[in-house]
Image: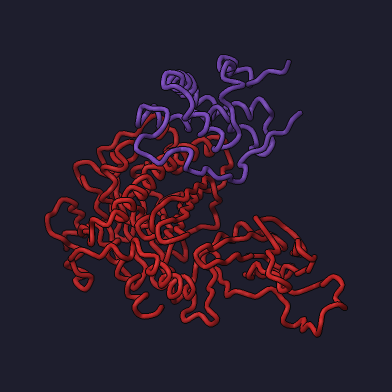
Chain colours: A red, B purple
């Protein structure tokens, strides 16, 4: 039995480097975190060619429901809509006449109407009406539907791919993570908390804050640091860790010496909670706690390129990191719980909503500070500990994809 | 004048209006503007009644609460909003965190409905 399997979180051995020697152990260049040229390559070879998660199918329960998503680094605005035939499709939000947006925000409609000259498209993207059409010269209406985007759905998450012909299917891109979490019951949960921030930090640097536990004892000293550290695991090392081709997963444990506060005692008995202790293992859901850690708390699943699908017993949360420029990122996070059927359940969920929000505010605070440090040009390289091998793996996947010209 | 809370919780009436908000956005913005002693008073007063509040409200359908029941539920949600400030960091707002003004608390679908009589 390996040291990792016995959950010895204080060993001086560097277990992950032993298991993944191909990732190396040296420092890495800061260039990918600061250079506009590098972001341009990422946009060309990663964001323009790979499946991107853009929302939940729950937002589109009925025919005519739609939402608009802006992908700033690619200069794209897209519409995801459920047509009258029930099919969910993606389109470029660009009128075929002169390029104007035909939709904004979210809602339900039968038609998208361009606000410039009134061209009308149905919710399947087909051109339906052109005012004063006789004044155009030989329009080929077959070519005037909203430009479609490859769109697919996995476990209720909607994805798009901007490539003319995607090199991989969505399932191929999700690979092991897709298989691991195919049965996680997202359909039984609804969005209960949603937060965002646009901050001066590179998207990878920002994402790294959510894929290692090494920061927990310091960054979360005001909130949940104590829950995830303690004598057994003082540096919040992962209890499970798996690096796949481009995705990765880790699980984190709680401190068995942790004493819940009054609000937490209420939440634990009334519903699921972030700091629910043994309940996470007792009520564990499909795809979680792969190593059966007795002190399991939650899993992170970092899905390439830019989102995390983090799971626990009774809830999950998602982080999305969208580059705006090389050192500016839009972060959005959503927390999902079972829709409450009783007041006590709703009150219990509110405890996690608040505590997790406060912890996320701690997480995102470091990103601008780190970025400013890298921007100063003092450092040519940065260091990743063995417990930060997730960040090292991410770095290597990105740099290799950029070198190879995509997947 | 109609009562603000169900009769069994009349002792909490001085928190309504003032502490009852229908969204996380409003609750969080309110919390960070209060002083710690004010938050502590609210927390200890309402937390002491939380089990009774929950047991009382559990008898009613969440999609058809009266205004009084809705106010009571919102006080319970507010005690959870205030809880980390009392139980964890002992300040109205979480320290060493991104400024509240730079952080968006985004809207979520309502989880209960108040039906005005």
Residue A163, compared with residue A107, is above or below; it is below
- Check the image and report above or below for A336 versus B14: below
Where does residue B60 sit, x and y in percent of width and height?
Answer: 64, 33
Residue ranking furthest to the front: A377
Quarter of the rendering containing residue A179: bottom left
Q: Which of the 4 quarters of the picture holds residue B85?
A: top left
Where does the N terminus of chain B fall, quadrant-wise?
A: top right
Picture coordinates of residue A171 (x, y %)? 47, 74
Q: Residue at x 49, y 40 (%)?
A: A349
Numbered marks: total: 0
Query: In the visual, does A189 lie left or right of A272?
Result: right
Residue at 67% in and 65% down: A82
Where residue A194 appears, as percent x and y from the top left, is 52, 47
Image-based side of B68 in relation to A117, left or right? left
Q: Nearer the viewer, residue A290 or A383?
A: A383
A119 left or right of A281 in image: right
Q: Is residue A283 above or below residue A138?
A: above
Q: Residue at x 74, y 74 (%)?
A: A126
In the foreground, B42 or A181: B42
Percent of width and height locating residue A140: 77, 84
Q: Tell me, yes or no, if residue A114 can be seen here.
A: yes
- Asked if residue A156 can be seen in this view, the reply is no
Quadrant (top left, top right, bottom left, bottom right) of the C terminus of chain B: top right
**Looking at the rendering, which quadrant does residue A250 occupy?**
bottom left
Q: Nearer the viewer, residue B51 or A202?
A: A202
Residue extending farthest to the left is: A12
């Amino acid at each position: 039995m390996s040291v990792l399997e016995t959950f010895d979180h204080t060993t001086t051995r560097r277990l992950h480097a032993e298991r993944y020697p191909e990732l190396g152990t040296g420092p890495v260049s800061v260039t990918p975190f600061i250079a506009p040229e590098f972001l341009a390559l990422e946009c060309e070879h990663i964001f323009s060619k790979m499946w991107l998660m853009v929302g939940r199918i729950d937002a589109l329960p009925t025919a005519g429901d739609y939402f608009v998503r802006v992908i700033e680094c690619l200069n794209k605005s897209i519409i995801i809509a459920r047509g009258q035939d029930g099919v969910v499709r993606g389109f470029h939000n660009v009128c075929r006449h002169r390029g104007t947006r035909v939709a904004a925000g979210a809602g339900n409609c039968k038609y998208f109407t361009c606000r410039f000259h009134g061209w009308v498209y149905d919710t399947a993207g087909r051109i339906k009406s052109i005012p004063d059409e006789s004044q155009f010269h030989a329009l080929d209406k077959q070519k005037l539907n909203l430009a479609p985007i490859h769109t697919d759905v996995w476990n209720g998450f909607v994805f798009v791919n901007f490539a003319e012909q995607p090199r991989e299917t969505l399932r191929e891109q999700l690979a092991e993570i897709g298989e691991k979490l195919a049965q996680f019951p997202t359909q039984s949960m609804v969005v209960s908390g949603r937060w965002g921030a646009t901050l001066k930090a590179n998207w990878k640097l920002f994402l790294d804050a959510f894929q290692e536990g090494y920061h927990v004892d310091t960054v979360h000293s005001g909130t949940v640091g104590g829950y995830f550290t303690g004598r057994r695991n003082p540096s919040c090392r992962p209890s499970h860790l798996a690096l796949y081709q481009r995705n990765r997963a880790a699980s984190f444990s709680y401190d068995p010496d942790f004493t819940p506060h009054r609000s937490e005692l209420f939440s634990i008995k009334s519903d699921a909670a972030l700091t629910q202790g043994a309940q996470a293992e007792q009520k564990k859901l499909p795809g979680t706690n792969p190593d059966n850690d007795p002190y399991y708390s939650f899993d992170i699943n970092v899905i390439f390129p830019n989102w995390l699908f983090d799971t626990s017993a009774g809830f999950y949360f998602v982080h999305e990191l969208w580059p705006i420029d090389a050192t500016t990122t839009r972060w959005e996070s959503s927390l999902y719980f079972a829709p409450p059927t009783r007041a006590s359940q709703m009150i219990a969920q509110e405890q996690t909503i608040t505590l997790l929000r406060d912890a996320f505010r701690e997480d995102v605070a470091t990103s601008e500070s780190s970025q400013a440090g890298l921007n100063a040009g003092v450092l040519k390289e940065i260091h990743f500990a063995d417990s930060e091998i997730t960040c090292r793996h991410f770095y290597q996947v990105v740099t290799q994809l950029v070198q190879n010209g995509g997947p | 004048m109609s009562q603000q809370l169900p009769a069994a919780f009349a002792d909490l009436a001085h928190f309504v209006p003032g502490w009852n908000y229908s969204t996380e956005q409003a609750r969080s913005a309110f919390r960070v503007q209060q002083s710690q002693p004010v938050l502590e008073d609210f927390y200890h007063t309402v937390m002491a009644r939380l089990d009774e509040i929950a047991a009382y409200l559990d008898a009613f359908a969440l999609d058809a609460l009266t205004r009084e029941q809705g106010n009571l539920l919102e006080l319970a949600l507010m005690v959870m909003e205030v809880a980390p400030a009392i139980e964890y960091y002992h300040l109205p707002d979480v320290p060493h965190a991104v400024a509240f003004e730079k952080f968006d608390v985004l809207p979520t679908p309502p989880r209960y409905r108040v039906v005005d009589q």
